Amino acid sequence: MDKVRRVISVIVANEAQVLARVSGLFAGRGYNIDSLTVAPIPGSNFSHMTIVTRGNRRVIEQIVKQLHKLIPTFKVIEHEEMVEKEMVLIKFSIESPIAEIQALCQAYNGNIVNAGPDMFIAMAADEAGRIAHFIDAVERYQPVEIVRSGVVAMER
Amino acid sequence: MKMSGAQMVCEAIIAEGVDTVFGYPGGAIMNVYDEIYKQNAFRHILTRHEQAAVHAADGYARATGRVGVAMVTSGPGFTNAVTGLATAYMDSVPLVVISGQVPLSLIGTDGFQEVDAVGISRPCTKHNYLVHSIEDLPRILKEAFYIARSGRPGPVLVDIPKDITGEIGEFVYPDHVDLPTYKPRYKGNDRQIKKAVEAIVNAKKPLLYLGGGVVLSNAHESIRALAEMGQIPAVETLMARGVMGAKNPLLIGMLGMHGSYAANMAMSETDLIIALGARFDDRVTGKLSEFARYADIIHVDIDPANIGKLVDVDYPIVGDVKTVVDKMLPMLEKKVDPDRYQVWRDILARYDELHPLTYNDCDETIKPQWVIERLGQLLGEKAVITSDVGQHQMWAAQFYPFDRPRQWINSGGLGTMGYGFPAALGAQMGQPDKIVVNITGDGSILMNVQELVTAAENKLPVINVILNNHFLGMVRQWQTFFYDKRYSETDLSFQPDWKLLAEACGGAGFDVTTKEEFDAAMEAAIAGGKVTFVNVAVDRFENVLPMVPAGGALYNMLLEHKEQCDG
């Protein structure tokens, strides 16, 4: 069976241990995590986790079911029609051509977000695949540091 | 009402109707033990090892269907309990285990006897809690019992820091549980159930595949009625022995790695598997690509994650086995034609004639299978049988005539050596009128042999029948078949004096080398009314057969029994 990439949202009770339960489930059962983000849902006792994973059909089905089986899990959404965004921060030396990099950022919903005497930081926010393209595109400016946020997603 | 956290633990245990708690005290749990000392509502059995406390609670739960409760201290007390938790988790046994923890202020400081109990137990509990505040304690205790027994049952750990058991708080035990995130589904989808009934009516070779979930669901009467109504043959897993009843003509036998020829062939040739509370474990299916190639599958399970995990299912039904089968019965009654499956039943009867479950008995040396058969003749339905893990376990499952569910208690999923004896103590507490026999081996019994003392102290007359082949028999069997007879570290020729060992701890012991001695020993053991070792010298090189080599197809079984009598 072919491996596919899947974005899964998990709505969980915002309580101690819950992240460990989810990440432990993936580790213990040998499932892959490409990225995992988590933050509280405003005005509720729940948190929203977005997990990007890959596996064949049976594995994905098991991931969804096993996540659902955790006691603090309220809902599991296997995304199909979604808006998906990821952010990246990239640090460059102040010697780098800032105007060129800024133009690239803007093509990927970003900008220059900080500058200091020795460096500046560029940001882009886009689909995960496009973020990868952006990182490739700025590679020739020899970035000093790259931090990706992991994906957040919302079903349309 | 104001009370300490320790009192709350006792009050919750009483409110849940628990009459017996198994445990072992220590520093971090002492507040609770102080309250146990002051009360008379439930009994506490002091085992001599925390692992045994959890297994005993587990045996109690399996024998009675109630939630078992065990109590341990922090650190090593808890880590000793982990094997018990994992054993119960794999076999879906409802347990609540209370562990002490170092005070909140010391958590994370590598305090004395501190270990991350919730971290360690997360993968081997259904759910676990570290109590952070006395306000949460009544709710958590209530939830723990509810989660343990509802849905697919399982063990729940409640880890309580010592300062919380010592603190005073308001106690109101909730009368119901409201967990928006946990809603087990019992009813089963009516449309799917209807389709499944159609599939049974239209099948030519239907087969009931019964698992441990049937026992947990107390569904055996409904299932016997279903089988009877359609004259549908049934196979049982290791965990479902007793569901159909040994004398039931529709019971083909146990299937799997050491299942009978007819049962495994039934599974290989059926055109419709009716899987009830079973989970297609690798010891049952053999090589998956060769498993039940001609079959559509109905799968009824309360745990959705079990459905479609290993095999594709045509009629998935998430629900409680008993509830779903009870819905099927009236639908099936109008439509099913038992004659339709006559040819199928004849085929299976023929398979059973061809290769019945058997062994070559011998007069000079006792065959282990004979011991089990003899036990069955002597005790039959009067006994509750527990077992450890290995050859003796398989022979017990093959040859004992189990008549009812909860008569057979063993560690099927985790395969825990050392389970049988403490589980037997728990079973005896839960079923005081029954004769409880632990069928064990000379390897397994030494893991938790210290429980002789617990048994003697509490006058629990558990009879341990040791099938003694001076080997770690099952590993030896694999070495014979697959490792060119290199018996690496499986020779147990150096042995304790079993009779003396039992006597030293306040029990009785019998060494048996002939069939007559066995009968006499059993008679004396039953009459003696105290914990007993019946040490039976059996054929050293007897193998458990049939055997499906690991990873092989279910229909490829080793069947030949050795002829000679060499002890």
Image: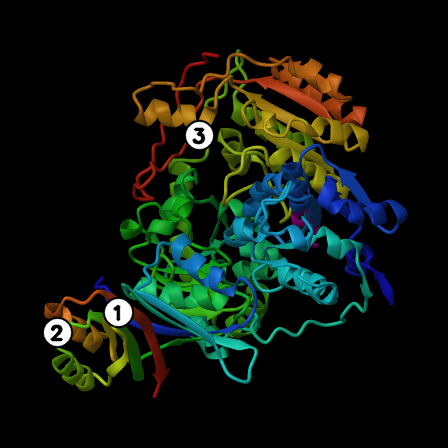
Magenta residue span: B61-68
- Disc 1 marks a residue whose amino acid type is Arg
Q: Nearer the viewer, mark 3 or mark 2?
A: 2
Q: Is residue B407 left or right of residue B529?
A: left
* Mark 1 lies on residue: A5
> Quick one: which residue is furthest to the left in this view?
A140
> Quick one: which residue is furthest to the front in this view?
A117
* Mark 3 lies on residue: B544
Earlier in the chain: of badge 1 and badge 2, it is 1
B532 w.r.t. A155: above or below: above
Give the distance between the C-alpha atoms of the residues marked 3 and 2, in whole angstroms: 65 Å
* Mark 2 lies on residue: A137
- Disc 2 marks a residue whose amino acid type is Ala
Give the distance between the C-alpha atoms of the residues marked 1 and 2, in whole angstroms: 23 Å
Q: Residue at x 12, y 74 (%)?
A: A137
Residue B218 appears in the figure? no
Report helix, strand or loop for mark 2. helix
